[in-house]
Amino acid sequence: MTARTSALWEKQDQHKGDRWRLFQAVGEAVPAGKVLYAGSFVDVAPSFVYDDVTYADMDKRAAAFFADTEGVQQIIAEHGGDADARFAFVHGDYRLLDLEAGSFDLLISLYAGFISEACGHLLRVGGTLLVNASHGDAALAALDPRFALAAVIQLNDGRYTVSNRDLDRFMVPKTTQSITVDSVKASGRGIAYTKTPFAYLFERVG
């Protein structure tokens, strides 16, 4: 592992094991053969759980990180993943990914913009979108007829849990407001809901 790879991962993993715990919880709830993490930067934590992950990011530092194949494999192995698991990296704009439509079982959108809109077609019908409220992408997914809320991910005392109970309590705005695709995009921020989990799981239904 190069010193640069190590430094980038140390910064990414500054809250030690946080992403590992997240994807352990997701992995227990969402079996997936092929995973796409758009806007990943160097967050290789999905590979601790899943055996076939494609990462995509525009950042040159991410490209350098994933180019150190042995270093990335070492990080994966040190966190319980299969050192021989497949991972790939696409260096570029996730809005322009040349990947087969409907070919992924899990699409990850964390802190990277409107991935649900740009990459939703790459997720198979019946597949799962993991999305948080950052940049308003969860709100955008809720407005998208291709997706239906399937579960929420709660974070309590450093522990992530997935629940599909009482989902009608979630995504209820605190104030009366008109929420549209245009308004979400214009604000670039999440909606203030009465209950706010760490993230949401949507099923692609159409």
Image (cartoon, grey):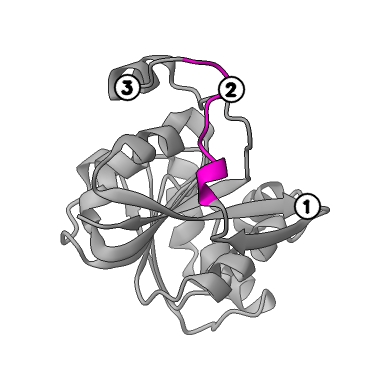
Q: Earlier in the sequence, mark 1 or mark 3?
A: 1
Instruction: Determine whether the residue tagged by mark 2 lies in a helix, strand or loop.
Output: loop
Q: Which numbered tag is attached to residue 156?
A: 1
Above/below status of 194 relative to 130: above
Q: How far apart, in angstroms, are the residues tagged by discs 1 and 2? A: 22 Å
**What is the quadrant of residue 161 in the picture?**
bottom right
Hey, what amino acid is under mark 1?
Asn
- The residue carrying pointer 2 sits among few (fewer than 14), some (14 to 19) or many (20 or more) residues within 10 Å by Cα, namely few
* Residue 93 visible in the current orientation: no
Looking at the picture, tell me which residue is in the foreground, 86 or 25.
25
* For discs 3 and 2, the disc positioned in front in the rendered view: 2
Q: How far apart, in angstroms, are the residues tagged by discs 1 and 3? A: 31 Å
Q: Which numbered tag is attached to residue 169?
A: none
Identify the residue at image location x=62%, y=30%. Answer: 194
Hey, what amino acid is under mark 2?
Lys
* For discs 1 and 2, the disc positioned in front in the rendered view: 2
Identify the residue at image location x=78%, y=52%. Answer: 156
Q: How far apart, in angstroms, are the residues tagged by discs 3 and 2? A: 16 Å
Q: Main secondary structure of the magenta part?
A: loop
Above/below status of 51 relative to 189: below
Position of the N terminus, as image quadrant, is: bottom right
Identify the residue at image location x=66%, y=64%. Answer: 20
Hey, what amino acid is under mark 3?
Thr
Which residue is labeled 2 in the image?
A: 174
- The residue carrying pointer 3 sits among few (fewer than 14), some (14 to 19) or many (20 or more) residues within 10 Å by Cα, namely few
**Taking 120 as reference, is 167 left or right?**
right
Which residue is labeled 3 in the image?
A: 180
Start-end of magenta stretch: 167-176
Tell me residue 64's x, y (percent).
Answer: 47, 52
**What is the quadrant of residue 104 in the picture?**
bottom left
Looking at the picture, tell me which residue is in the foreground, 141 or 96.
141
